[in-house]
Image (cartoon, rainbow, N blue to C red):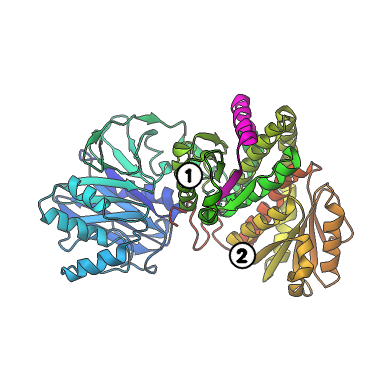
Amino acid sequence: MCGVIGYWCPEGFGEAFSVIVDSLKKLEYRGYDSFGIATINRSVLGVVRAVGKVSDSKCLPLGGSVGMGHTRWATHGGVSEKNSHPHRDCNNRLAVVHNGIIENFQELRIALELRGHILRSDTDTEVLPHLLEEALNLGMSIKDSVISVSKMLKGRNSFLVLDSLTSTLIASRNGSPLIVGVSDSSNEVFIASDIPAFLHKTNQVYYLDDGQVVILDKIPEFFDFTGVSINKRLITIPWKSEMISKGDYEHFMIKEIMDQKDSLISAINQNPEEIMRVAEEINNSHGVFFIGCGTAAKVCHIAEYIFSKVADKHINFVTASEFENYRHFLLPETLVIAVSQSGETADVLNALSVAKSKGSKIISIVNSPTSSMARISDYTFLINAGVEKAVASTKATTSQIAVVSLLAYACAGKLREGDRLLVELAGKVNDLLNPRYEERVKALADRLKDSENIFIIGRGINYPLALESAIKIMEVSYIHAQGFAGGELKHGPIALITRGTPVIALVADDDNAQEIISNAMEVKSRGALVIGISPENNPVFDYWLKTPKVNTVGSAIANLIPVQLLAYHLGIVKGFNVDYPRNLAKSVTVK
Ligand code: M6R
């Protein structure tokens, strides 16, 4: 959700502000409704805050070589300057930026106000500087104050504190990610909610775990919540800052769609022994749950079809935010498989802690190798998609489907066959990622741009794909889109079809093909504009986007790519910011 960045360089020349602005721009995908920066300049705290994106802003710089910044995705309190971070204490000594939700903030706030504090915002965050102020007034050190306040909070939280009196920058993690980056010469130290914030400066990092604080200094000092000092290992991240640039593309979303030329191959490049070991666990487990949120939840739904088709095996898919309701099915022999691009989604992490509390084993399929999910799982598959920055997930989704497919083939004892089919598929998918095909999709986007609704229908594996297609179209073009199982149409949704209503039919070269064509005919007879995404043309289609002839499992990837392109071009033709759609954030680290 929100992005936080702290910067420490006391021997610098007062460049904290510009460094922080640069980092905030790189964190914008985590939240972009408002931002703020605080620095310490000759022991005086300076703060700027503004509504909008940091990349659009022209605020006056602050002096100082130590500071922090925040890019906000509003949870408590509307989008306004007063609700933007950093927040301060009554004496203007401290500034705090925060990522997470303080679930007990109301009681903390009431108690603070009764004790005479004046809170100026509607946020949960603002209790933090005032609680810290009280702890410091009791004579505690800044470190002990941060620990003591951290322990008062309910929910998943991380925050950074800038103390102008002691020129200290200190951070606490309990739920939301925080990573410390140290430059080669150790004269610049960063702390951020994600590595891209400082990757252009360093790839040497320390990971903060839950229940830990760090005081940023030449050599960062780490403590647990009992105040005991802890040693941490400095890790080199195998990423380069070019990996998070748009290159020659205008937007991250189109770059990432095009990256699928290579990302599928990287995804299936898994260690066969590990795949077989996990497949054996799946086969021997007492119940398997695939869990995820949003698009990743749709991948879990797709997984249900893949496992049934390929391995004759029933797996359960559950939206992670609902997983707690299934807790009584969990046993130590149950396997919970989390699918997530970021590996930081709060609802998934919560679900995994439920699974852990029941002794169930956890496998994760994630893109970020150092994410919280990867770190708490018994085994992690990396999808190797490279950094995905656009809010709308594209290459990570197809890579997740590829890894799930490999696992299903391995469960069926057909890993080699699965591998071969997926390599073939990756080659065929390349045909969709060329300028001529894109032009065709663009023309369709132009035709659909004024639609109020778009419906997507599919059967079999193309049913959850229709649900995912709706997410893609909605989040980037703001056109209401809804996916249905083809067979469900006449049980209600067909009432919404009028002359010209666009209906996209996702067709695979499988047993469902004839029936989904019949469903397309049903809507066509009621005036719908039928768009076929299909390996074969059909007279019922008013518009045809050809996809390669692949098996059912492969169609989950092959049919999705034209939809991703369509969503992108709908967003572009409507003039929207496709990389940062309104109200959304890339990594949803609050419940
Ligand atoms: O990082 P995750 O894969 O766990 O994120 C889950 C969802 O928030 C994410 O897929 C979201 O639905 C995307 N915006 C979809 O494009």
**Residue 475 pos. (x, y %):** 58, 60
The amino acid at mark 1 is Lys
Query: How dense is the environment of label 1, judged by Cα within 10 Å: few (below 14), some, or many (20 and up)?
Result: some
Q: Is mark 1 within 8 Å of ligand 1?
A: no
- Left or right relative to 494: residue 21: left
**Residue 364 pos. (x, y %):** 53, 39
- Left or right relative to 347: residue 206: left
**Residue 202 pos. (x, y %):** 37, 35
The amino acid at mark 2 is Lys
Labels 2, 1: front one = 1
Residue 358 circle label: 1
Q: Tell me the magenta residue range.
A: 268-293
Of residues 105 and 332, the one nearer the viewer is 332
What residue sits 45% from the left and 57% below the top? 591
| Residue 458, placed above or below residue 214 | below
Q: Is residue 396 magenta?
A: no
For the residues labelled 2 and 1, say whether their Cβ atoms are less than 8 Å apart: no
Residue 109 circle label: none
What residue sits 18% from the left and 67% below the top? 117
Name which of mark 2 and mark 1 comes first in the sequence.
1
- Left or right relative to 50: residue 317: right
Q: Is there any visible trace of residue 230 in the rendered image?
A: yes
Of residues 91 and 225, the one nearer the viewer is 225
Residue hosting label 2? 574
